[in-house]
Amino acid sequence: MFPIQPKYHPALSESILFFILTVGLISYFLIGLGTEPHVPILIALLLTVAYGLFRRISYKDLEEGMIAGARSGMAAVFLFLLIGILISSWMISGTIPVLISTGFTLIGGTWFYAITFAVTAVIGVSLGSSLTTTATIGVAFIGMGSAMDASMAITAGAIVSGAFFGDKMSPLSDTTNLASTIVRVDLFDHIKHMSLTTIPAFLISFILFAILSPDEAISVRNLDMYMAGLETTGLIHWTSWIPLIILVMATIFRIPAFISLAISSVIATLIASITSGLSWTDIWAIWFNGYTAATGFEPVDSLLTKGGINSMLFTISLVILALGFGGLLFVTGIIPSILSSFQEKLQKVRTIVISTAGTAIGVNVLIGEQYLSVMLTGETFKGVYQKAGLSNKVLSRTLEDAGTVINPLVPWSVCGVFIADVLGVPVLTYLPFAFFCLLSPLITMVFSGRALKK
């Protein structure tokens, strides 16, 4: 069942106590002391190593657990490096500037948050990747919000909500395919069944964002200066749309995300070499360090100074630490003990669904990885649902409602760290306004008593 076999089998009470201790430690450092997430994760990792040695697990086994945990995130690490290049190349090709400029032209102040949420959701479904959506259209919207004096917390919450609606409902999404595959449900049956909880969450979120949206008189202040600043870059051309079109076409034809991003980045770089006036030496430097704008208007310079491999190293180092910590939690038996304890104790339908959601959320909080949250919870509860006579569609839906969309709300998670870095808004700042992500598991739990029987 578990990707890393435990070398010790602690009692359930011992596992829960250790879970509370580590989560409490991480929360205290992040919220109470305001430290960078690397510090408490590393301390928790050292504490788990000490626990394993105390329980007579050899250091070699502990080390292998850390390495196996970190190895599970290597695909994400390479993707993050490529996204850093994507943002840089989209800056110098004018793709992100033209998206921001078009947004200013088309979107007035009225219902700004709601429109941000809806447009991001549509793009998210098209691309099938929450991180790609956030790093492209999300960066553009955060720029518009900054220019309009909108709340960065609410704007980021709208972007995250829309991006993860797309990640959840797109047939191109990795997590959507993973959830349906693990519990053996047809992909489109899975998506159709998710609409029972996802559509209400979307509608409620849209209404909340519409209510919170600023009025036009406040939002368009200094808009002309921003538009002039974007034009001053000299980056905006008709060719600036080509990298976006290529990325959308690549995802429609289901080309893997890494290859899609690589193709779009290379095309954007070639366009920039023709239109931007930059030398190849400058372009390669921008690939690594990101683009630095110099328009003379500081807000636009701040908005466009982004990207580069170097900008992703903070995220990558934290992902490796967090997943290494997760590997230790497996090899010490902490997570297997907690997950296995549910299997024989669940009888009522409502209890089963709520426990499934709680487990998916718990794995996200403890490990910080949405794929493991979906995979481990699905494997753990398949037998429980079969024994209770519940449809596998209920399980696959719950995995997404409480597994996929919770990851961006965890400050030390893969998605949380990446989004906070790309948007420049801390997770705990946008968390209260990520309405769709908060509502999805809540709606699943409220209506759990109406789960389908086989």
Image (cartoon, grey):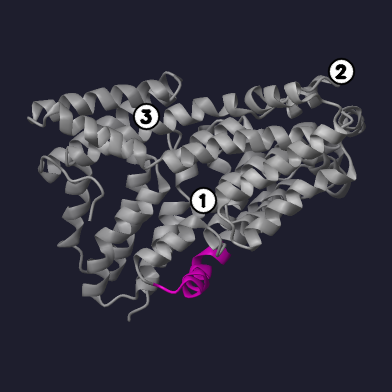
Lower sequence index among marks 3 and 2 = 2
Residue count near mark 2 (Cα–Cα under 10 Å), binned few <14, some 14–19, many ≥20: few
* CA gap, disc 1 and disc 2: 38 Å
Does residue 276 lie above or below 241 as drawn? above
Lower sequence index among marks 1 and 2: 2
In depth, the one of 450 and 132 nearer the eye is: 132
In the image, residue 312 above or below residue 408:
above
Q: Which residue is mark 1?
A: 437
Element class at badge 3: helix
- Of circles 1 and 3, the one toward us is 3
Q: CA distance from mark 1 to mark 3?
A: 25 Å
N-terminal of the pair, mark 1 or mark 3, is 3
Counting from the top left corner in percent of width and height, residue 256 is at 55, 54
What is the quadrant of residue 95 in the picture? top right
Kindly give the residue lying farthest to the front in the view shown.
280
Where on the picture, by quarter, is residue 7?
top left
SS class, disc 1? helix
Residue 206 appears in the figure? no
| Amino acid identity at mark 1 | Cys
Residue located at (80% from left, 19% from top): 298
Magenta span: chief secondary structure: helix
Q: Nearer the viewer, mark 1 or mark 2?
A: 2
User: Going by the image, does 280 lie left or right of 221?
Assistant: left
Relative vertical location of residue 436 with respect to residue 58 in this rendering, above or below: below
Q: Residues within 10 Å of mark 1 (few under 14, many from 20)?
A: many
**Residue range highlighted in magenta:** 185-200
Judging by the rendered image, the residue that carries numbered circle 3 is 321
Residue position marked by numbered label 2 in the rendering: 296
